[in-house]
Image (cartoon, grey):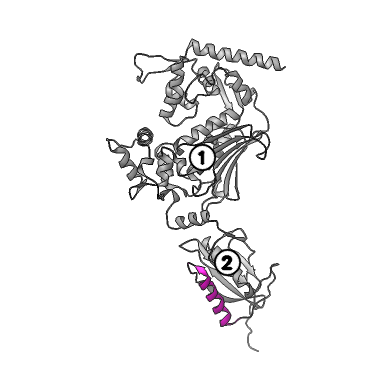
Amino acid sequence: MGMQTKQKPAGRRPAIPPESETAEWKESLGEWKEIVETVAAFATHRGGRIFVGVDRKGEIRGVQHGGKSMEDITNRIVQNTDPRIVPSVRMAAYQKKDILVIDVEEARSKPIHAFGRPFKRSGRTNQRLSPDQSAAIYMASRGQTWDETVFDDARMDDISMKNVRSFIATARRERKVEWSGRDAPIKVLRLLKLVSSGKPTVAAILLFGSYPQRHLIQSEIRCARFKYDSSERPIDLKVIAGTVVNQADEVLRFVQRNIRMAVEVRDGGPRRTDVWQYPLDAVREAVVNAICHRDYASTSNVQVRIFDESLEVWSPGLLPHGITIRDLKRNHESKPRNKLIASAFFLAGVIEKFGQGTQNIISLCREAGIPAPEFEETGSSFIVRFRRPEKKPTGSVAPRDTAQVTAQVTGQVTGQVTGQVAGQVLRFCMSPRKAGEIQNLLHLKHRENFMNNYLKPMLDKGWLAMTIPTKPRSRLQKYRSTSAGIKALKQAERRSRTAKADKQ
């Protein structure tokens, strides 16, 4: 009797994978229109595989095989996709039944249209893309970003050369770049690819425009303070326009006005430290990320929503292709949606490193002892959410109380100094401080903005004074609170105590 060879049972194959971003089941070729849409969605995303002959419960039903069936479905896919997709179609045996397997590779040119409509895979479903999403994917697949585009009615007169010169001065200080000469602004615009065919790009208008919102009203930032949820009337509201370079500072001032602050005395020393409900550097990082990486083709605005228990930064546009929520918590590839704006932000010191913003936010929250931020995609927006610690810091001061303590300051100083900011500076400068120390206290990035809108108004009012008045530009120059400034602060504090006592 001859030796018998042990044969592997027919149909023994790895199990068919569950439906996902890269796998889908179809019961029969009668669903050919849905198959074409899935091919387009897979090709726009990162490829995938369609199993025809598997019902919705995952049970293998099989299909009638034959060369004609394979040829027909291939032709229907090719004829109804644009750019045309030619998939790999083959028969395979599972559980002694034949099914059709359609392999789809990721397309180089995106998005892929099925029956004239663009699709992309998201989870287990095929999503029809909006015009904004379709345009963003189209440009990304060609190595372009929307901020490189040019509006037909844009002119070089839309650009403020004063804003460009201010940026050059900041870049010299932050990155030691060597740009000089009378024609430096135009040279810099060209060097940074902010001019195309003699017209300013979208990035140039947003960065240096005299009034960017003339072309891009969606570049406004909307800030609101609510009591419980965003369906109610806001307690405080501010719409921030201007260039993207200066918007973060404006947002931080709104945030400081609407969150709690604790006052701590550390190490038994006489100096008091202000501790905010949320670390301002972390909030700033989230706001800068939103401004820099938002989808400017979308008509939505960046939003900052403050509630009793949380603070949220909403940014139009989902995460870039290939980046997940999980990736944000570890080292990941940098894929700036607006590469020209990102490059300018780096030169101005607004951002330090690419691809580490979310990790910085997590670290800053951890250092401040508050919960790690939450990252979420919803609809067509990306959200960073800060949660307040469960236990309120000792000695915390509510936003309204802080404003009352320095109420006399508000409205008496020109520029952008609020009562809260003036009170901070006056207390801080009881001991002489350098300008850089005061700027750091207020978490302001741009020197010119700080000098013109914060320091100078308080000097003009007589609440601050130079320690070396005969040499205003001395490297040893410091600033101190004057008797007039201290008097105004004490009067405000007395009024606050009286108002509090009257309420009790």
Left or right: where does residue 13 sit relative to residue 460? Answer: right
Q: Residue at x 35, y 20 (%)?
A: 473
Relative vertical location of residue 486 with respect to residue 381 in this rendering, above or below:
above
Q: Could you say which disc has been placed on residue 220 in the image?
A: 1
> What x and y, as percent, mark residue 430?
50, 15
**Residue under the image location 45 percent in, 55 percent down:** 139
Residue located farthest toward the front when viewing the structure as drawn = 153
**Quadrant assignment, res 390:** top right
Q: Position of residue 256 (x, y in %)?
A: 56, 29
Q: Amino acid at mark 2?
A: Glu
Question: What is the crowding at mark 1: few (fewer than 14 residues within 10 Å), some, or many (at least 20)?
Answer: many
Question: Label 2 belongs to which residue?
Answer: 37
Q: CA distance from mark 2 to mark 1?
A: 37 Å
Q: Quadrant of the N terminus?
A: bottom right
Question: Judging from the image, what secondary structure is the residue with disc 2 in?
Answer: helix
Helix, strand or loop at label 1? It is: loop
Dominant secondary structure of the magenta stretch?
Answer: helix
Is residue 405 in view?
A: yes
Which mark, residue 76?
none
Q: Amino acid at mark 1?
A: Glu
Quarter of the image that includes the C terminus: top right
Q: Which residues are magenta?
A: 65-84
Residue 227 located left or right of residue 316: right
Instruction: Tell me if residue 234 comes above or below residue 434 in the rendering.
Output: below
Magenta highlight on residue 367 = no
